[in-house]
Amino acid sequence: MIAVDTNVIVRLLTGDDVNQAKKARLLIEGNDVFIADTVLLEAEWVLRYAYGFSVSEINRALTGLLGLPRIQLNHPRQVASALKWHAQGMDFADALHLAVAHAQDAFYTFDKAFIKKADHLNLLPGVESP
């Protein structure tokens, strides 16, 4: 199994560099590939800020990538939950943080928007302000 960096995923999903996109596709199609949570987190940020992808475009791209048969993740169920919550309006980083920590008794943050969104999605109790 190999692991890939954010730039491999971004090249694959954007095709902005034809040669690198082709190499990324061949690499991912030809290997069992591990994608770390941190790489997904950075990939979402790059797609959103550098490429202007919308929430639906990001979710469609990441869901398609993560649905490939040879892709492995740290926390596949939690990533699926994070993508679902992201599609429902939660920031992807917040959603991933919460999904990975969801088995804990509570998740504390000073981010009032995060608390409000979690409450709106009925993900409380658990997200609280200290």
Image (cartoon, rainbow, N blue to C red):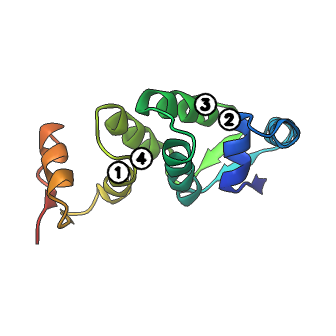
Q: What residue type is disc 1 on?
A: Ala
Q: Amino acid at mark 4?
A: Gln
Which residue is labeled 1 in the image? 99
Q: Regarding mark 4 in the picture, which secondary structure is present there? A: helix
**Mark pair 2, 1: CA separation:** 26 Å
In front of the other: label 4 or label 2?
A: 2
Residue shown at 60% from the left, 36% from the top: 66
Left or right position of 51 against 14: left
* In this rendering, the label closer to the viewer, 3 or 2: 2
Can you give x and y, in whole percent of width and height, for residue 59 in the image? 48, 32
Give residue 78's mark.
4
Front: mark 2 or 1: 2
Q: Seen in the image, is 4 located left or right of residue 65?
A: right
Residue in the picture at 80% in, 40% down: 17
Q: Is residue 112 left or right of residue 80?
A: left
Residue 122 position, x and y percent, is 14, 39
Q: Going from the N terminus, do you reach mark 4 or mark 2 first? A: 2
- Please tell me which of labels 4 and 1 falls first in the chain: 4
Task: First in sequence, mark 3 or 2: give its number.
Answer: 2
Q: Amino acid at mark 2?
A: Thr
Which residue: 18% across, 46% down? 118
Report how far apart the C-alphas of labels 1 and 3 lie in the structure.
19 Å
Residue underneath mark 3: 67
- The label shown at residue 14 is 2
Percent position of residue 86, x then y: 36, 38
Judged from the image, the secondary structure of the residue bearing numbered disc 1 is helix
Q: Earlier along the polypeptide chain: callout 1 or callout 3?
A: 3
Q: Amino acid at mark 3?
A: Gly
